[in-house]
Image: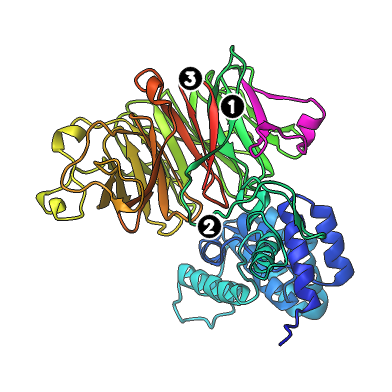
Amino acid sequence: MSAEIETTDIVRLIIQFLKENNLGESARSLEEEADVHLNTVASTDEFVSDVLEGRWDEVLAAVAPLRLPPAKLIDLYEQIVIELIELRELQAARALLSDSIPLASLRTSDPGRHNRLETLTHRSDFSTEEAYGLASGLGVSARKARHDRRAAIAQALAAEVVVVAPSRLVTLLGQALKWQKSQGILDGGVMSSPLAAGVPVRHNIFQGTTTQESGTPLDDAPPKHHLRSIRFPSSSRCTIARFAPNGRHLLTGASDGLIEAWDYVTGRRATDVAFQSEDNMLFMKGGAVYALSFNQDGSLLAAGDESGAVQVWHFATGKTARRFPKAHTQAVSALAMSRCGRFVLTGSHDHSVRLFGMDSGHQLREMRGHTAPVTDVAHVSDRARIISSSSDGTVRVWSVTTGESIASFRPRAPSPADSAPGASMLRTEIVAGGAPIFAALLSARDREQVIVCARSPVLSIMTLKGQPVAQIAAPTGDDDGDTPAGGAVVDENKVFLAAALSYKSTVAFAATTEGRLYTLRLDQGTCAASMEVIDPKQVGTDEVLGVAAHPHSNIIATWSLSGGLRVWRP
């Protein structure tokens, strides 16, 4: 039986690949020539939420590259004009009415409707009935009319867009390689390329050959094997590391202020990054780099240093996009760029959390409440909240709109009921006073859950309202594979120091003071594997500082006090 593949689907795969790899001009040219458009958004829920909440700048940015029916675009732009008039932003309303393509076409297709909008821009007051075409005397409030119209527009636009998993072309190629291997067409090798899963093989897709050593890591297999070590000069050490969203590069920040991109498969500096191939370095003048963050598509890279400065670069070129020289009065210890790249969230040793705008170049919000250095920050997926953790032992949730703290909590010590078989146990005195928190990791599987890594023998799973969900500890024995995590007794020598979530948010990779890294299955409460990431002879003098997880596979990187960085694979 043969399977027919639509030519337009192939074109869409190529367009997605081009856009994800920052080849925007090529993608637009292909769309125009083939008359095929990729009507996709990152999240339908977030897109609908933006419309319902009237975040029109986000909505317009999302619909700009889409091919939508003219009538639905006219409805959208008409609503924006009406709301600008209601806010008495008359100049902006008139500009949108005269300059936007959808409303310019309305002047020809429906002159009466266009004239009604023009009349509204010249009224001295705002009439809900006239703006929304309601019969007089109904008593419908402007708020209800606005909400109903937004809901109708959101429903209409949502029907035109789809959400597609990232890197579909690469995923399908990987699946094709798996099938060829199962049929004996492809000899040797592993089933995923470095682009898709970060494993050390190179497939020649056209010739059907593998050019490096073979192996067969599974998508869900825990990391167990040392892949590569990246060494730094004796005068420098690794202070932070992050994988790029494309999965090909590992970025490191060092104590001398240098930021480098690495091919983690070879352990060498990446030569396919433009700024490095031209021997241009990304460098923070203020000293050690303590924080790195990408936006969702990897086009922007932000870094924060010990002087309190933040700088953002265009990753493809290495050119500065924005600099905030005095973002904080002390070291920047945490960074999170928004998905769209328009906002930079920072945390600092000065105990504050701040939000900066890339467009304005100014601070938009300052959030205070922590009483010790901030260790982690993140944007909650609804974009209305921010989360932060601190060495003061608390996790805080903040309102983006007001900058006020709307929740503050500590990892809760379990009640006696938590000592049931299979549950983890943490003595109350371990968390008394608040153990320093190193990371607050938002789950991609449940948007209202956060995994908290504190200096304690357990990882705590909490809701964003501070309600405890579960606690997971490292196994008390030396078992290495799907053993119950924790139990009625916790080994207090296995204190967590750093953690990262897998790309599926199904497991946590957590490092302890005994120099081991545990792969903990969050939904089952079991330990899938553990391995030494610090030489046993150096335990006590060396310890893990951080863990970074690959965006598409269970590849991880760890760095420690000794200054080096090591990459691990399944």
Relative placement, left or right, of 473 versus 418 is right
Residue 285 marker: none
Residue 173 relative to residue 242: left or right? right
- Magenta stretch contains residue 155: no
The picture quadrant where one finds residue 81 is bottom right
Q: Which residue is labeled 1 in the image?
A: 253
Q: Are marks 2 and 1 in contact (CB under 8 Å)?
A: no
Residue type at mark 3: give it: Ser
Find residue 255 and report its image quarter: top right
The residue wearing badge 2 is 219
Q: Which mark is residue 562?
A: 3
Going by the numbered disc 2, the residue's amino acid type is Asp
445 lies above or below 316: below
Q: Position of residue 306 (x, y in %)?
A: 52, 19
Is disc 2 surrounded by few (<14), some (14 to 19) or many (20+) residues within 10 Å? few
The magenta stretch spans which residues?
257-283
Dot placed on the residue nearer the N-terminal end, 3 or 2: 2
Q: Residue furthest left?
A: 416
Residue 481: image location, x then y, percent: 36, 50
Q: Nearer the viewer, residue 444 or 68?
A: 444
Nearest to N terminus: mark 2 or mark 1: 2
Q: CA distance from mark 2 to mark 1?
A: 28 Å
Q: Secondary structure at mark 2?
A: loop
